[in-house]
Amino acid sequence: MGARSIQPGKSYPLGATVYPNGVNFSIFSKQAEALELLLFESPEASTPFQVIPLNLRQHRTFYYWHVFVEDIGVGQVYAYRAYGEFDPARGLHFDSDKVLLDPYAQAVVGWENYDRAAAIRPGDNCAQALRGVVVDSGTYDWAGDLPLEIPYSDSIIYEMHVGGFTRNPNSGVAPQKRGTYAGLIEKIPYLKALGITAVELLPIHQFDNQDAPPGLTNYWGYSPISFFAPHIGYSSRKDPIGPLDEFRDMVKALHQSGIEVILDVVFNHTAEGDETGPTLSFKGLDNQAYYILDADNPAHYSNYSGCGNTLKGNHEIVSRLILDSLRYWVAEMHVDGFRFDLASVLSRSRSGHPMEDPPILWVIESDPILAGTKIIAEAWDAAGLYQVGTFIGDRFAEWNGPYRDDVRRFVKGDKGTVANLAERIMASPDIYHEPDREPNRSINFITCHDGFTLSDLVTYSEKHNEANGEQNRDGSSDNHSWNCGVEGPTGNVEINQLRQRQIKNFLTILLMSQGTPMLLMGDEVGRSQRGNNNAYCQDNQLSWFDWDLVQDNGSLLRFTQGLIEFIQTHDIFRQQQILQIGPDPHQPYIDWHGVKLHTPDLSYHSHTLAFTLGYHGQERLHVMLNAYWQPLKFQLPYPKQGMQWHRLVDTALGPPADFSPLATAPAVLSRHYLLEARGAVVLAELQRF
């Protein structure tokens, strides 16, 4: 391929932009003395066919380097070299031996020869480096598709891993589509039948799967390289542009089934790690701009993420990168929202100190392109900044960490938990103090990717992470789990029945609470990770969805589906205001009880709670929770005239009696209900048959 003619180009847009007669390239670097644009014949080419020097006079405007190359277009493979001082003591990390990825690249190739170690050791790594691909994202046929904008009040979120969902051979997906966006499309009927309204995908931004202990793989994807490119490892198509179209096919198909797509985004760190890590992109372009460096020794990185480095989110260049990325995924890729991993990092200043009014978060909150999206904060970071209940803004929802911990402790049987449980069931008004705050901005969850599965929560009292190669030192030791009497799997029938009951207790509390519920992939069928609570590096059947469980544990799936369908058809779970305390026929309310009506026991030694939910005199439910190790008799409210209580849920009963649809729910005629040890019951007030 011959050399192409070049023009000075322009500074905007950043990245590679296609025009009828060529491509404009623009990239930021304040400290670089010179840049080179490298053009490759193919993703696998070991050397570029053309090297285009960018000089200060013609190709730099302010701190933006730019060039226009004629007669190239979509599919062109490219990368950069940057020249400047290598002085880590001053935070300068230029190394012209290293080939650098464009931070705005919308597709990333070169994986066949990629070597992370080559980006660390001295010397030229061109043959082993990653490259970008020129993309024209405006040519895809969306066929009228748009983001769905489902309210939180109507949402059921399913946190899932694109690869792990269908990678298991028993998924029934063709081998070439297992673990891909296309494979997920084939399983949309399962998701629809489950009743969820949104999938929250673990990171799909292009990440470095080599960023893991020796012999293992970065499975979760919290190791981003590009914030604009979909992960090529989740594509069944291996052509450079294929992953973009396959991702968009997935989004369009999910939307056609009424399911939103929420991306787990990692704007707190990158795969370049600390001072011992590789030079892949940001570090070699402008280390001082992109990362928070140690104030006393700029050769080292401030590590508020726990992953080696911390992006400088409130630097104007990084802020622009983040906002441009979010806008791209909404406007061009049609996603419906974002969950911000370790979002509190984005409230830190350029020097790492917490800020009262962090600019990047306010910009995200107020951006008109993002106005209809869900924005969900994991409102803490790895350095102790914990902002649940105090995260900025009027739009951000939050992962409710206290909900997870307090529900776990109650079901486990810990003392001193009932008062907190009552707050969590009401969407945590003790944490979220604004009287007009929508309760569904509390994202309620009991399990997520980071920690035990729901099955393991009732099977293991201790973590078992030996397979991660860190002598079981990694992962949290504070899990509030209980093995029900035996550590790990057992043939003891009574223990296994208790474990199933505890799982159903968790699900019942989660789905009877105010707020937006989130389920972890596979919890609805009892997926286990054999006690591993930090399976970030386990790309194998330990982490994958086991599709045999859909049949083997079908009764738990039926229970979960039934509860989800029930709450989606009842207005008491879809209203957008904090519940009134005490019975009120004119507005949604909650009325607290214990084993006796109107006498909740919130004392330290209590293990019981009951409550009545009512909605404008049209719906009335009564929920009873017994975390005590003995059966207890609960007093029931009088049904209204012409009505009687019917049992929907009793977790102490075997299937199918554990959940009964409204049409077949048995009547409860007594004024009391004997609730078995460690059980949960839900009654609905219906007309007498």
Image: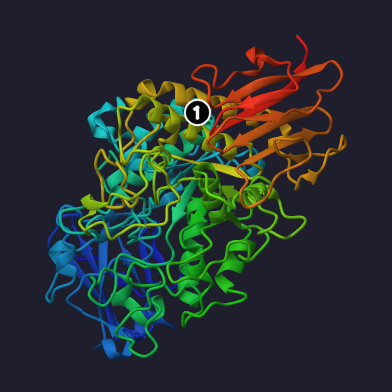
- Mark 1: amino acid: Leu
Residue 413 in view, yes or no: yes
Query: Does dot 1 land on a helix, a strand or a loop?
Result: helix
Give the answer, above or below, for where 318 lies relative to 333: below
Q: Position of residue 213 (x, y in %)?
A: 20, 59
As drawn, 97 above or below 14: below
Q: Position of residue 233 (x, y in %)?
A: 27, 46
- Number of numbered callouts drawn: 1
Residue lying at 36% horizontally and 66% vertically, measured from the top left: 103
Asked if one can make out residue 47 in the rendered structure from this viewpoint, the answer is no
Q: Position of residue 2 (x, y in %)?
A: 17, 62
What residue is shown at x 32% (from left), y 90% (from top)?
Answer: 90
- Tell me the residue at 53%/34% (across/down): 678
Horizontal relation, residue 87 to residue 616: left or right: left
Q: Indicate whether 638 appears above or below 267.
A: above
Foreground pick, 231 / 539: 539
Q: How is the image coloured?
A: rainbow
Q: Quadrant of the C terminus?
A: top right
Q: Quadrant of residue 354?
A: bottom right
Q: Nearer the viewer, residue 534 or 233?
A: 534
- Disc 1 packing (10 Å; few <14; some 14–19; many ≥20): many
Residue 389 rendering spot, x and y as whole percentages: 63, 62
Residue depicted at x 35% and y 22%:
552
- Quadrant of the frame with the N terminus: bottom left
Which of the 4 image quadrants contains residue 85? bottom left
Front residue of 532/351: it is: 532
Q: Nearer the viewer, residue 629 or 488?
A: 629
Q: Is residue 158 positioned above or below 277 on the image?
A: above
Q: Dot 1 corresponds to which residue? A: 194
